[in-house]
Image (spheres, rainbow, N blue to C red):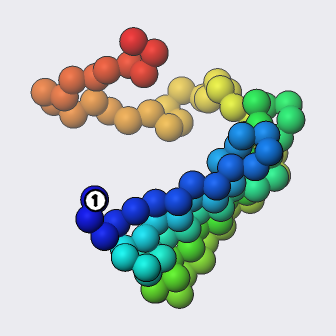
């Protein structure tokens, strides 16, 4: 898209480890993925988001990782807005 471009880096296991987004030569955003698990299909347990122009770095480090868990009713549930069409991801 004109001056905008991205760079994706993968490790030898074909896992995405770095995604960089540029405007011209200026790095706008970098997301780094690390600490991939072996027991949950190689899901990264650490995420680092960097915004160099804003001198901002944020990271998430998951100590206990579980995917596709059942949650208690009412947790992480959003009410469907009136008139919204819901499309399930597995359809």
Q: Is residue 62 visible?
A: no
Occupied quadrant, residue 88: top left
Q: Residue at x 31, y 70 (%)?
A: 3
Q: Residue at x 26, y 65 (%)?
A: 2
Q: Quadrant of the N terminus?
A: bottom left
Q: How many marks?
A: 1
Viewer-proximal residue among 14 and 58: 14
Q: Secondary structure at mark 1?
A: loop
Whole-percent x, y for residue 49 in the image? 58, 67
On the picture, is 25 further left or further right than 39?
Answer: left
On the picture, is 30 further left or further right than 17?
Answer: left
Q: Is residue 18 visible?
A: yes
Q: Residue at x 28, y 22 (%)?
A: 86
Q: Residue at x 38, y 35 (%)?
A: 78
Occupied quadrant, residue 60: bottom right
Instruction: Return the residue at label 1.
Output: 1
Residue at the top extreme?
A: 91
Figure check: 45 above or below 52: above
């Amino acid at each position: 898209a004109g001056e905008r471009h991205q760079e994706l880096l993968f490790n030898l296991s074909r896992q995405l480890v770095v995604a960089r987004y540029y405007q011209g030569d200026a790095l706008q955003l970098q997301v780094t993925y690390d600490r991939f698990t072996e027991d949950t299909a190689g899901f990264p347990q650490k995420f680092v988001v960097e915004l160099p122009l804003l001198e901002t770095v944020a990271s998430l480090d998951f100590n206990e990782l579980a995917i596709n868990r059942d949650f208690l009713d009412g947790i992480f549930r959003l009410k469907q807005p009136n008139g919204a069409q819901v499309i399930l991801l597995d359809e």
